[in-house]
Image (cartoon, rainbow, N blue to C red):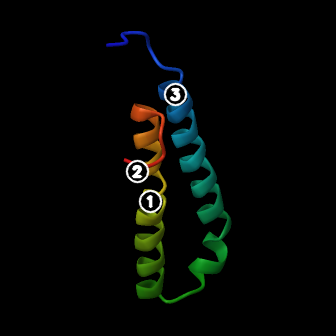
Amino acid sequence: MNDQPSWRKPAGMALILLIITVWAVLIASLSHWIGELPVLVQAVIYTIAGIVWILPLRPLLIWMETGRWRA
């Protein structure tokens, strides 16, 4: 078994931070427009936005562990 640390883990962590940052900036840049909508619509949009950023993480985490994008 290879006990050497993989470069994929630090690279993957950096990508995760980049994804979170880009997503947060995107949603924040839309907040003026979203803020004009009814409160319940805002709640739905922010709930969906809070979940959607997680979707690319599964393949990224698999890649960090295995070096492949699919399990």
Assign a secondary structure to mark 3: helix
Number of labels in the image equals 3
* Screen quadrant of the N terminus: top left
Q: Is residue 28 left or right of residue 59?
A: right
The amino acid type, in three-letter code, at marker 3 is: Arg
Q: Residue furthest bottom?
A: 38
Q: Residue at x 43, y 49 (%)?
A: 70
Pointer 2 residue: 58
Q: Residue at x 52, y 34 (%)?
A: 12
Q: Residue furthest left?
A: 1
* Between discs 3 and 1, the one toward the N terminus: 3
The amino acid type, in three-letter code, at marker 1 is: Leu
Between the C-alphas of marks 3 and 1, the distance is 19 Å
Given contact means CB atoms under 8 Å apart, are the residues at marks 3 and 2 in contact? no
The amino acid type, in three-letter code, at marker 2 is: Arg
Position in image of residue 28 (x %, y %): 61, 62
Pointer 3 residue: 8
Q: Residue at x 43, y 72 (%)?
A: 48
Q: Nearer the viewer, residue 1 or 15?
A: 1
Which label belongs to residue 55?
Answer: 1
**Mark 1 burial class by Cα count in 10 Å: few <14, some 14-19, many 20+:** few
Assign a secondary structure to mark 1: loop
